[in-house]
Amino acid sequence: MLTSIYPIISAIVFWAMSVFVGLLAIRIIITFADPNPFGTVGRFGYQLRKHTNRFVQPAADFLFRYRIDKKYAPILTALVMCVLAYFALQIIGNTFLIIDGLTLGIVKGSIKAIVGIVLYALLSIYILFIFLRILSSWFVFGRKTFFGFIRRVTDPVMLPVQRLIPPIGMFDISAMVVLIVLQIVQSFILRSFVL
């Protein structure tokens, strides 16, 4: 699946993101050009804003909280969508790798490969939880919600790292450090158990 289906999904996501980022780039160019609202370009810009506003508005609200001009919201939206697409492709790729690895391990009867893939899968789920924790930090949620569960599951790893690496301004880089370490451990597991 990793070599047959994943490239197709990857290409579709790449082209969809390219079109989306292109439309946001056109939107920001039209916004800064400030054309006649009754001309052809102005009407096109209005339609483009109307159709992309549901994606851009959360970024505009976020920028407004920090007193940054909302004109830059399409840039932030494009950046966030690219990051989300990257992580979505990573999750899909890891899922296919796990399915392929388990299938190969079962067919070959290799307990070592099966244990390695299971460990890899557990780390992949934990990485997903940390990524969701990063996303959930932008929202308010209760302790009895799914994001509350994710916070409780990731706290044993994240809290000690956050004490060692305090936030830099509004950016908490401790999650990035944990993600990098977990990905290194994953690659070690793949080399040691599976390959």
Image: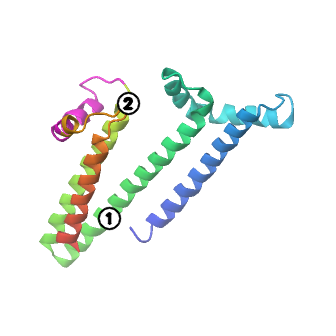
Of residue 160 and residue 99, the one placed in the foreground of this image is: 160
Residue 165 drawn at (x, y percent) = 24, 38
| Relative vertical location of residue 7 with respect to residue 37 in this rendering, above or below | below
Identify the disc placed on residue 170: 2
For mark 1, give the secondary structure: helix
| Relative vertical location of residue 2 with respect to residue 81 in this rendering, above or below | below
Look at label 2 and name its amino acid. Met
Q: Residue furthest left?
A: 111
Look at the image and tell me in which quarter the N terminus lies: bottom left
Magenta residues (range): 140-160
Q: Is residue 184 left or right of residue 93?
A: left
Asked if the residue at tag 2 contacts the one at tag 1, i.e. Cβ–Cβ closer than 8 Å, the answer is: no
Asked if residue 150 is among those painted magenta in the image, a careful observer would answer yes
Q: Is residue 111 left or right of residue 185?
A: left
Look at the image and tell me in which quarter the C terminus lies: bottom left
The prevailing secondary structure element of the residues shown in magenta is helix
Residue annotated with mark 1: 97
For mark 2, give the secondary structure: loop
Q: Could you tell me which residue is drawn at 25 percent across and 64 percent down?
A: 187
Distance between mark 1 and mark 2 Cα atoms = 35 Å
1 or 2: tag closer to the N-terminus: 1
Residue 87 drawn at (x, y percent) = 40, 50
Q: Could you tell me which residue is drawn at 26 percent across and 34 percent down?
A: 166
Identify the disc placed on residue 126: none
Look at label 1 and name its amino acid. Leu
Q: Is residue 25 left or right of residue 59?
A: right
Could you classify mark 1 by the number of other residues whose Cα lies within 10 Å: few (under 14), some (14-19), or many (20 or more)?
A: some
